[in-house]
Image: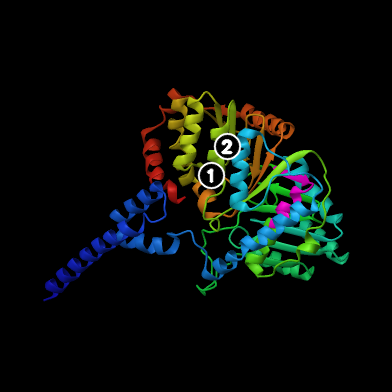
Amino acid sequence: MMLLDLSALAWAYYCSEWAVRLVMVVVIPFRRTSDAARSWLLLVMFLPWPALVLYLLIGRATYPRWRRRRFAQLPRILQISADRILHLTDVARERPPRRFARAAVLIEKIGRLPVVDGASAELLADYVLIIDRLIGDIDAATRHVHLLFYIFADDETGGRVMEALGRARRRGVACRVLIDAVGSRPWAGRVLARLKDYDVEAYRILPITLFRRKSARADLRNHRKIAVIDGVVAYAGSQNIISPETIPNVNNQELMLRLEGPVVLELQAVFIADWFLETEEALPVDSVMAPTAAAGTVATQVLPSGPDYRVGGIESLLVTVIHSALQQVVLVTPYFVPSEAVLKAMQIAVLRGVQVHLVVPKIADHHLVRFAQQSYYDELLAVGASIHLFRDAFLHAKNVSIDTDVALIGSSNMDMRSFVLNSEVTVVIYDRTVTLQLRAMQEGYMASSDLLILDEWRRRPLTTKVAENLARLVSPLL
């Protein structure tokens, strides 16, 4: 009798596994890339029930219902901000170079923010100097300070920034801070408590709670790094508010933009949108988006992207600008796990006679990601792309130059997480002078890198190749 019961249970479990497989074959491909669908289906075929549990947890890049309801109101808020930008600035809307006009239209369709002229753009790569400049601008604030950072640590650097916010509050400056609940998790409680003591309004972005109705998924994160001071100065790029020595054995090489002029209002619009999504408070546009005079001659545009934006984001922009390149493309990223579209755009660019350079850190902080990343090297090297492994530090900067015409600087990595799961922000600069400055930095990265040679790369150990192939199978899920 016992044997019969066990046999029946085994048969029932076997049938349930096939039921899961058959259902998931129908469900998984819906509104998903073919690469991601293949990875999920492979997992389902081998481990049906664990795959089903994992899929229910992270299978769809969707936010909780309460956030989706708020996001439905966001186009109106962004449109108000965009209209305000064009109304306030006395600088004519600038046309980007003709071959990048489609990229500019794409950005505006996705993020609702137009190309604006009249900016000054300063590239900052010195880690300590970036924090010093930010604190100096906070100390000069007279109206408001808005900070949105993936990581905000309660260490020496974070303490200095919080003290500056405290000084600003004592002067009567409105201070608002958003920090990601997962990125800042080790320090969030202390940071929020200290900011509360300073009378600074501060919130966790996408908190994880025991109550599913209010909780956000742990893998859907706000990865942006934005500071806006008085609506006249802004920062955007790769650096978080954390001391370089806080994370052991990791010395980051960063790049931030310090911006003045009308483009600051576009980063302000991104902050206004994120503030509304987290607090349901619509900040008064009249008070936080005051008239902003031209500070230079640089034409710029801001692209916010993330799971909320259903029609694409930084991935679509990368494909568009790479296809527009005529001479050279340089991509700098700490994580390179591209979509099929980005990979093909890079390969086609090389075959069109464009020099394509990929600069990534030689140091790895995530082994699975490193193996997945390495699985793409052969395909790029085989067509003639150049891959540079930066030696001197963990290259955390995220930037792209297209010929000498366009520069992209922001928070987005070139991986599926930034393409699909993370909320990111990218500043697009249509200016030869700034692009040449970025190119000079990128050439410095390449001079401090080891150049991969195809024949040598193919002689790597068989165990490494196997690890890369296995990691490649799950790369669309990373």
Give the extent of the magenta segment. 256-269
- Mark 1 vs 2, N-terminal side: 1
Could you say which quadrant of the image residue 324 lies in? Answer: top right
Please tell me which residue is depicted at 43% across the width and 37% down the height of the picture.
375
Q: Give the percent coordinates (x, y) of residue 34.
A: 38, 47
Regarding residue 165, the answer to whether it shows in the image is yes
Around disc 2, counting alpha carbons within 10 Å, would you say few (fewer than 14), some (14 to 19), or many (20 or more)? many
Q: Is residue 316 left or right of residue 270?
A: left
Regarding residue 400, the answer to whether it shows in the image is no
Q: Are marks 1 and 2 in contact (CB under 8 Å)?
A: no
> For the residues marked 1 and 2, what is the alpha-carbon distance in whole angstroms?
9 Å
Please tell me which residue is depicted at 74% across the width and 64% down the height of the picture.
176
Residue, disc 2: 321
Magenta-drawn stretch contains 223: no
Q: Give the percent coordinates (x, y) of residue 428.
A: 66, 42
Q: Is residue 47 left or right of residue 258?
A: left
Q: Give the percent coordinates (x, y) of residue 45.
A: 28, 54
Q: Is residue 429 above or below residue 379?
A: below
Helix, strand or loop at mark 1: helix
Q: Amino acid at mark 2?
A: Val
Front position in the image: 82 or 35:
82
Residue, disc 1: 316
Front position in the image: 73 or 27:
73
Q: Amino acid at mark 1?
A: Ser
Could you say which quadrant of the image residue 27 lies in? Answer: bottom left
Helix, strand or loop at mark 2: helix
Q: Is residue 361 left or right of residue 380?
A: right
Please tell me which residue is depicted at 59% across the width and 27% down the height of the picture.
328
